[in-house]
Amino acid sequence: MTQLELARKGIASPQVKHVAETEGVEIDFVLQGLVNGTIAVPANANHTNLLPCGVGKGLRTKVNANIGTSPDFCDKDIELRKLQAAIDAGSDTVMDLSTGGDISGIRRAIITSSPLPVGTVPIYQVGIEAIERHGAIVDMTVDDIFDVIEEQAQDGVDFMTVHCGVTQASVARLKNQGRKTDIVSRGGAFLTGWMLHNEGENPLYQYYDRLLDLARKYDFTLSLGDSLRPGCLADATDRAQVEELIIIGELVERAREAEVQTMVEGPGHLPLDQVATNVQLEKSLCHEAPFYVLGPLVTDIGAGYDHITGAIGGAIAAAAGADFLCYVTPTEHLSLPDAQDVKEGVIASRIAAHAGDIVKGVKGAREWDEEMSRARKALDWETQARLSLDPELSRQIHGRIPSAGATCSMCGEYCAMAIVDKYLTRPAVKH
């Protein structure tokens, strides 16, 4: 039975019990969230070394790290090092987006090595194999698509991005809209090209029931992809994007009827004043399904620093109710990330996620900050390092310039807290 089937029968699976324990919430809270569709627990039974996590309302905002090869650079060992960098930095999940080399072999190595839930975008493999087999992506067949989805499910993939909402209707909206950057989703581009070339409907939409059958069989979570997400601020929250979101909302309902878990993916590039609006739109149109956002990136000019532009948008999105942040690395728009980029992307997104959790009142979030404040007041540097998101970096920076006494080298003997503490705690002088 799927996690959703079990929850509807009131049965707490080991995965649900683990989520409840790690989140510090009641098991019934997680079960009710699964039943309502507001929480997802991506957990493929074939991922045997999985430590599951919960994504959704009332839980800690989660962070995903994308890894994977490209046609220009393929090295399985480097991808495994990136996986370890993501784990060490505190990522909650990883996605293998490989498009080069032995895609299946790399994916299996990542799943075998990853205790974190693993996601994929199966249409990537379908498109690449279609070029090898038929000569062009637009010549892929319906069976090609579903054969790869089943192969990845058998391998133990916990959640899959499936671009079901890009349809003839939403592409028509795109044509009429007149965008600056058209389609920036690679999976969305593969399927749009196929639809336009073959003058047919998106197979993932037309044969959605076939997809649901596979998702239920292997109990992987559908992450309904945003093929028409804006690739620049000028395209944000336009008719094409909203049309796709309306379709996705309908597909969420159909998945729940089939006892399949869903998440909904969202933009993308958004100006600050549209971030909360997009979260509210998704929650309304998609019936409170967990919302998984890329960034959002709040400016288009952050090249080399897009982990920062993404973290700014991510914090606002999380505070507004987004449940899952896909990290952005410094190399976004520029290059394939390395292990250091992965680390920086995860840390930036974890800062954003935690900032949102404070606003949302997630259990333990504010207490973590209060504990750090007490350590700072006490000039307890080791506790400050332990409580930080990157203890090693914290210790390294603190020790970079030695300081006399308990203070740091920024203020030294003029430390405000040390001065005030001295006089606040000194007995009053009687006159």
Image (cartoon, grey):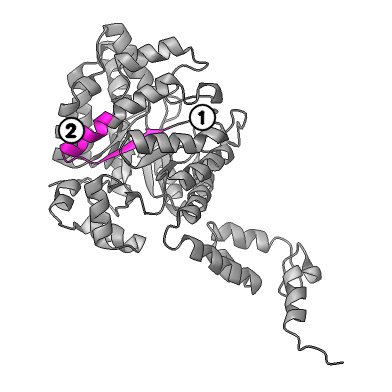
Where is mark 1, residue-wise? 269
Q: Amino acid at mark 1?
A: His
Going by the picture, which residue comes out furthest to the right?
A: 431
Decide whether residue 103 is among the magenta residues. Answer: no
Residue 96 visible at all: no
Indicate the quadrant where residue 304 lies: top right
Asked whether, in this view, residue 215 is left or right of residue 411, the answer is left
Front residue of 4/431: it is 431
Q: Position of residue 329 (x, y in %)?
A: 52, 38
- Which residue is at 18% across, 52% downward? 7
Q: Which residue is mark 2?
A: 212
**In the image, is 303 to the left or to the right of 404?**
left
Q: Secondary structure at mark 2?
A: helix
Q: Quadrant of residue 265?
A: top left
Q: In the rendered view, does 102 fall on the left or right side of 86?
A: left
Bounds of the magenta span? 250-266
Q: CA distance from mark 2 to mark 1?
A: 30 Å
Which numbered circle lies on residue 404? Answer: none
Which of the two residues, 214 or 391, is positioned nearer the viewer here?
A: 214
Q: Amino acid at mark 2?
A: Leu
On the question of residue 300 being in view, the answer is yes
Does residue 251 belong to the magenta stretch? yes
Residue 366 vertical placement versus 281 (above, below)? below
Image quarter hosting the C terminus: bottom right
* Residue 207: percent from left, percent from top: 18, 22
Image position of 334 with respect to 117: above or below: above
